[in-house]
Image: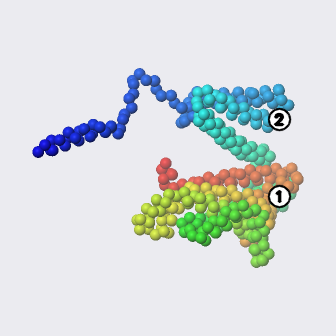
Amino acid sequence: MTTAPERPVLDEARHAAVPPRTVLPVTEPTAPPPVRRTGLGRATAEERVARAGAWVAGFALAWLLTQRVLPLPSVGWLLVLWFVLGMGLVAVTTALVGDRNEVADQLVRSAVTVGALVVGAALVSVMVFTLAKGWRPLLHLNFLTDDMAGIGPRDAFDRGGILHAVAGSLIQLGIAIAITVPLGIGTAVFMTEVGGRFATVVRTVVEAMTALPSIVAGLFVYTVMVVALGYPRSGLAAGLAIAVMMLPIIARASDVVLRVVPSGLREAGLALGASRWRVVWHVVLPTARPGLATALILGVARGVGETSPVLLTSGAAPFLTLDPTSGFMNSLPLYVFSTVRSGEPQAIARGFAAASVLLVLVLVLFVTARLLARGPLSKRS
């Protein structure tokens, strides 16, 4: 009879002996706000001013040492010493208010920023140099609407143009893209979704072909089509040579992109009763569409500037040719190569102008690929 009232007493004692699992921190209303770490998050105005002051002081010290103290008057030594002194001053200014981790964070951030600026400066310098050498032919509209049929290397800029080279590059690149996009993405799907021992062999061959010299691809297509099959040198042969260069790049990059797709998406599609092919077509490929566009961009960047395969397989023609199977067909890289090496100032200026057009053409192709790769989700965001 006495056991029933003893159970609540024992339970209360047991609960009182166990400490609570959640403990709220005690905050004092008069406590100062926590000090923000300088190396994390968005930089404050003081941090930005300190970093800018460190780099300005580094430049002043580098100029003083190279131009006044040491016999190093070249600009290269000035930039190198500026980078070294700037990194040292950034470390010193950060160490005054932070710990070792914050100093390392600032040094890595500064190094990455300087690297990005160097790459951007290199790209801008190439574009400025090319435009500075070839701006005069670009002032004439006929440079984009005429070909070089009957035009000599010493003729004025108001005669002749690069229409035949632009058309040839677009046709050859279109042939290469039409071949490499389905083959490259299909190869990546086979290596990622199918797998097996043969997929390992295919991946090894693709990785080995990414380092294939362009002259070897040109010799391969020239030997097979022109020598063995007796097919004349044409734009089609040049497109096949460019496709050989682009295929491993697109296949390798697409393989990496498809591997990044979460496996949960595949499992969800299979769990809903879809076949493997429908999951790949409706789930995996749409998810990886931006990455596949990047793979296409990398392939186009490799193939659009190739000169030696085109020189071996298509030849150079000064007139406009729209049929890739009819004979010789020129291209922008081949036109630039042939005009710059001629030695004539007029022809060299035309070559640099054609190189400027090639840069713009590559930029337009890249932007077009990015726009086509946008899905519904990316458009909404």
Of pointers 2 and 1, the one earlier in the residue sequence? 2
Residue 319 shows in this picture: no
User: Dot 2 corresponds to which residue?
Assistant: 74
Identify the residue at the far front of this view. Answer: 2
- In percent of width and height, residue 144 lies at 73, 54
95, above or below 227, in the image: above
Type of amino acid at the residue the image marks with label 1? Ser
Total marks shown come to 2
Assign the N terminus to one quadrant of the image: top left
- Position of 289 compared to 139: left or right? left
Residue visible at 41% across and 22% down in the picture: 30
Q: Secondary structure at mark 1?
A: helix
- In percent of width and height, residue 199 lies at 60, 69
Q: Nearer the viewer, residue 137 or 372?
A: 372
Residue 23 image-quadrant placement: top left
The image's mark for residue 125 is none
Residue visible at 79% across and 56% down in the picture: 336
- In percent of width and height, residue 225 lies at 75, 74
Identify the residue at the far top of this view. Answer: 30
Tell me how far mark 2 sits from mark 1, CA to CA: 35 Å
User: Dot 1 corresponds to which residue?
Assistant: 338
Q: Nearer the viewer, mark 2 or mark 1?
A: 2
